[in-house]
Image: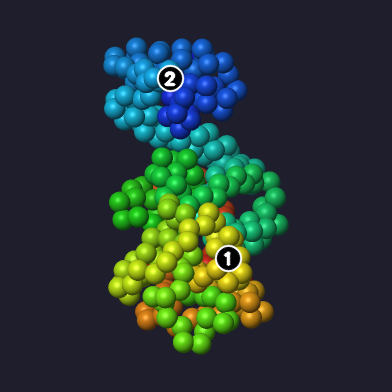
Amino acid sequence: MTTNARLRALVELADAGSVRGAAERLVVTESSVSSSVSALSAEVGTPLVTRHGRGVRLTPAGERYAEYARRILGLHGEAVVAARSEADPEHGAIRLAAVTTAGEFLIPDMLASFRAKHPGVVLRLEVAPRGLIWPMLARHEADLVVAGRPPDDLRSARVRAVSPNSLVVVGPPDERAGFDPGRVTWLLREPASGMRATCATLLERLDITPPQLTLGSNGAVIAAAVAGLGVTLVSQRAVRRELDSGALVELPVPGVPLDRPWHVVSQDDPTPSTRLLIEHLLGVPELGWRTPPG
């Protein structure tokens, strides 16, 4: 078994939490996974897994090694994509990652416009909460990320384009009269969501502790607000249709709207195919992207 396959077995074991789960993800036998991890342990010179009940779990050394394994696999994937793109950018591939709201409301128009001009480029997209997206870029598992402001500690990455994004508080029309943000139920995104963190910061700044209801996606939060279950902080663009129809209304909250621009972020040295996408975004005014200041 190749070194990459062994590294992948360890990473899948870390993610799945069991040999059986890793084997199912990799479509191999459980003994193959166990053999791969044992070979890595022998190569490293320290146990990477230990018995835990009827199963196994990673040792501290295994957890540390798995993080390096993710980066190694990400870099290898990036190297393959870069080599193919270098030879023929119009027939390369781009690994994109986007936070949920961007994936629902920005990515479709972006990719449709790009594909119309560059049909030979293979586009691969992962949509997930902010807490999962940025590590993908750090591990070189993604060539381009569309999300809010990148973390300050993100290395080897560069903001390529920005687009305006205004966050507003919305709710059903009957909330408008005498609206009190401390009395109503606030609809929150899942724990890994950047929007949830921003909303929590807003509530803390307002010094209120209202009832809260957590939902698992941007669409679910908007649907719940339309149904009258509460109010929420959301991208104005994401609820444009509901605001135009009157299903939702903007509600007055001190300090809101919030200016939270979208960012397109790539590796410091993007692949040729990734450069094509960046140039396309900046070259089509209708998409709303511009070169970042500074």
Where 223 falls versus 78 (above or below)? below
The answer to which of 157 and 227 lies nearer the viewer is: 227
Q: Quadrant of residue 105?
A: bottom right
Q: How many marks?
A: 2
Badge number at residue 117: none
- Please tell me whether mark 1 sits on a helix, a strand or a loop: helix
- Residue 121 is left or right of residue 237, and the answer is right
- Residue 192 is left or right of residue 239, and the answer is left
Residue drawn at point x = 53 percent, y = 54 percent: 216
Where 76 falls versus 225 (above or below)? above
- Please tell me whether mark 2 sits on a helix, a strand or a loop: strand
Which badge, 1 or 2, comes first in the chain's sequence?
2
Disc 2 target residue: 55
Disc 1 target residue: 224
Q: CA distance from mark 1 to mark 2?
A: 40 Å
Q: Where in the figure is residue 196, as x and y percent of width and height?
A: 42, 60
Residue drawn at point x = 49 percent, y = 46 percent: 143
Q: Look at the image and tell me whether residue 73 can be seen.
A: no
The answer to which of 281 and 173 lies nearer the viewer is: 173
